[in-house]
């Protein structure tokens, strides 16, 4: 079991998979509002040129898509090229030209099915945060996220949302370190490929804002 996956997370994952086989999909998740005004100090590793932060383009998608680490369906080259084509933006951090971590955002809609909606003119949605396995635990996800905040602010947008699944401890830790607000804890169950969907809000202001340790 890795550091990012607790016993409960592994159990929940197995349960989800079993339910998926019989056509039932479920998710327990936080809707998160990220604090894009938070200006985390620049990381000395970026200042020293050890890591570089930049927008990623078509060529980078090919490189991520070929990486042996890839484990999620949205990490294929085709899915990521398609995402760029739709106008989504991707910011990454590189080490010796190798992509170490990245995150996506868009200003059009929240695409996570239970929360799907068009965004207002001052809103943005952050998604698909990913750090390659050999770079995890090095504090790179908060760096790319903070860079995305700068890009979103430059577009005049002030309210930014994302989603973290309840059992995704690492994702929740990153957002706590960035001072995010956990707007609500939701649960969603759907049947027959999202044909029928039920959604409940279990708790509002679902998590304390500050990390217990940073
Ligand atoms: C979530 C994720 C992006 C975090 O990236 P990261 O660059 O490792 O972020 P951090 O270095 O800030 O570490 C965050 C937490 O991951 C956990 N972690 C630490 N070392 C780790 C390692 N070697 N392997 C896995 N997780 C580790 C710790 O809980 C850490 O919190 P801490 O700093 O308070 O100890 C990364 O784990 C990942 O890509 N996961 C798979 C995709 C995913 O779940 N994305 C989130 C979608 S919202």
Image (cartoon, rainbow, N blue to C red):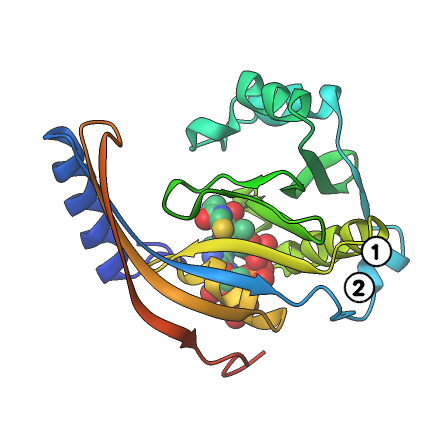
Q: How dense is the environment of label 2, judged by Cα within 10 Å: few (below 14), some, or many (20 and up)?
A: few
User: Is 124 rendered above or below residue 79?
Assistant: below
Q: How crowded is the residue under tag 1: few (<14 C-alpha within 10 Å), some, or many (20+)?
A: some
| Spot occupied by residue 127 in the image (x, y as percentages of width and height) | 56, 45
SS for dot 1:
helix
Q: Residue at x 42, y 48 (%)?
A: 115
Of 18 and 48, the residue lying toward us: 18
Residue sitting at the far right: 48
Q: Percent x, y for residue 172?
A: 47, 64
Q: Which residue is drawn at 56% across and 63% down?
A: 33
Is the residue under label 2 in contact with that under label 1 (CB below 8 Å)?
A: yes
Image quadrant holding the C terminus, namely bottom right
Left or right placement of residue 3 versus residue 193 in this view: right
- Quadrant (top left/top right/bottom left/bottom right) for the N terminus: bottom left
Quarter of the view holding residue 202: bottom left
Can you name the residue that lies furthest to the left here? 22
The residue at the point 13 percent across, 38 percent down is 19
Q: Does the residue labelled 1 lie within 8 Å of ligand 1?
A: no
Residue 55 vs 63, above or below: the answer is: below
Residue 54 shows up from this direction? yes
Label 2: which residue?
43
At 45% from the left edge and 59% from the top edge, which residue is drawn? 31
Residue at the disc numbered 1 = 46
Left or right: where 155 falls relative to 17: right
Q: How many marks?
A: 2
Residue at the top extreme, as displayed: 78
Q: Which mark is residue 194?
A: none
Q: In this view, does 94 lie above or below 153?
A: above
Give the side of residue 7 with respect to residue 123, left or right.
left
Residue 137 seen: no
Mark 2: secondary structure: loop
Tell me residue 114's x, y (percent): 36, 46
């Amino acid at each position: 079991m890795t550091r990012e996956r607790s016993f409960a997370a592994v159990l929940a994952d197995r349960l989800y998979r079993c339910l998926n086989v019989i056509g039932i999909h479920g998710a327990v998740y936080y809707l998160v509002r990220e604090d894009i005004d938070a200006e985390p100090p620049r990381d000395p590793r970026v200042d020293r040129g050890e890591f570089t932060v930049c927008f990623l383009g078509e060529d980078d998608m090919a490189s991520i898509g070929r990486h042996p680490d890839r484990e999620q369906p949205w990490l294929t080259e085709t899915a990521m090229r398609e995402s760029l084509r739709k106008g989504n933006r991707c910011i990454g951090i590189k080490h010796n030209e190798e992509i170490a971590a990245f995150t996506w955002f868009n200003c059009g809609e929240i695409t996570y099915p239970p929360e799907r909606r068009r965004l207002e003119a001052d809103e943005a949605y952050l998604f698909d945060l990913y750090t390659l396995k050999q770079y995890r635990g090095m504090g790179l996800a908060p760096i790319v996220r903070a860079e995305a905040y700068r890009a979103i602010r430059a577009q005049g947008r002030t309210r930014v949302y994302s989603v973290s699944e309840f059992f995704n401890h690492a994702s929740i830790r990153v957002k706590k370190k960035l001072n995010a607000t956990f707007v609500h804890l939701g649960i969603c169950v759907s049947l027959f490929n999202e044909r029928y969907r039920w959604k409940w809000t279990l708790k509002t202001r679902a998590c304390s804002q500050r990390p217990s340790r940073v």
